[in-house]
Image (tube, rainbow, N blue to C red):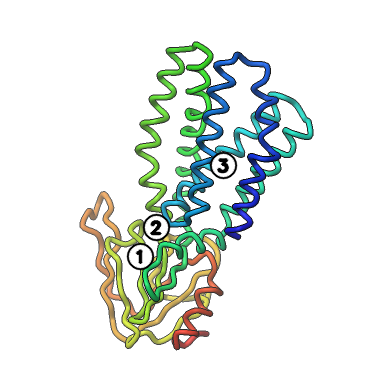
Amino acid sequence: MLWAARVVWLGVAVIGGAGFGEALAEHSRSVQLAGTAALWVGWAAVAVTLAVPSAIGLTIARVLTPVGTVAAMAAFVEAGASSATVVGAVSTLLALVIVGSGEFGNLMVQASAYGDEQRFLLRPPAAFYVPTVVSWSVWCAGVLVGPLALAAGSWIVGVVVTAAALALGWFLLPRFHRLTRRWVVLVPAGFVLHDHVVLAETVMFPSAILRRARLAPADTQAADFTGPTGGHAVEVTVSESTTVVLAGTRSKPGGTALHVLSFLVAPTRPGRLLHAAGERSLAVG
């Protein structure tokens, strides 16, 4: 998947770039230069993250790749249907599908792993879907409109929108990255749950107390550390009660301490986690 993303993203520039050129062709020279420069900067930023995979690279790729898709769709509307604009739209959409996949996400976060550890990315809590999409959409509109308005000489609109986009980006990027940095880690010493969105602190379950991992049944009574979110969850059972502190809320800023004998997590690839757990001698099923 990582090489697929690299090849497709290269194709966005090589065979899809002409569509952007057609969309900018009817505008002033300053707008053409600003639009072209912005497109290349965004393309290069994603290209670097694909060349050097990491967890922060996953955040950057998933924030910027859809911007390219929106820009390609705007080029399609602006210049009309042509082979160049259709190829641009299709190539950026394909890149978006690959970058958004669970396999790609796991490869990127695993690239930042230390030593003998396996990371398994967690699905975001359902409550974050709408706020994330809405806030990203507002930021994306500002990023695309602001610089072009400045280049077109609309100084008031350009300055206000660009400044708002920069401020919003400064605010949103750390929060988007926090959603990325949520994973289960299998290490020789046990099972680690790293999730600073749901939990107040990382929790470690030593190998000696791990009993079983399985796909969670519908009637499970295990503590829910999934967010909650949809899809299949994995239930992990331990032999000794372990204290886990949930992230703070407005009513309980210090968090809530739970003593658990079983808990749920929601990896993007549940089967992959269970297979790896079985290879590390944890009872599965």
Residue 186: percent from left, percent from top: 41, 75
Circles 2, 3 touching at the beta carbon (< 8 Å): no
Residue 164: percent from left, percent from top: 39, 27
The one nearer the camera, 25 or 86, is: 25
Amino acid type of the residue that numbered disc 1 sits on in the rendered structure: His
The circle on residue 66 is: 3
Left or right, 138 with respect to 21, comes to: left
Circles 2, 1 touching at the beta carbon (< 8 Å): yes
Give the structural element (helix, strand or loop) at label 1: strand
Residue 178: percent from left, percent from top: 37, 52
Amino acid type of the residue that numbered disc 3 sits on in the rendered structure: Pro
Q: Earlier in the sequence, mark 2 or mark 3?
A: 3
Q: Is residue 231 above or below residue 32?
A: below
Q: CA distance from mark 3 to mark 1?
A: 27 Å
The one nearer the camera, 234 or 148, is: 148
Residue bearing mark 1: 194
The one nearer the camera, 180 or 130, is: 180
Q: Residue at x 42, y 75 (%)?
A: 221
Residue bearing mark 2: 181
Q: Is residue 65 above or below residue 155?
A: below
Q: Earlier in the sequence, mark 3 or mark 1?
A: 3
Q: Residue at x 75, y 26 (%)?
A: 80
Q: CA distance from mark 2 to mark 1?
A: 8 Å
Q: On the image, which quarter does residue 40 sit in?
A: top right
Residue 165: percent from left, percent from top: 42, 29
The one nearer the camera, 246 or 106, is: 106
How dense is the environment of label 3, judged by Cα within 10 Å: few (below 14), some, or many (20 and up)? many
Q: Earlier in the sequence, mark 2 or mark 1?
A: 2
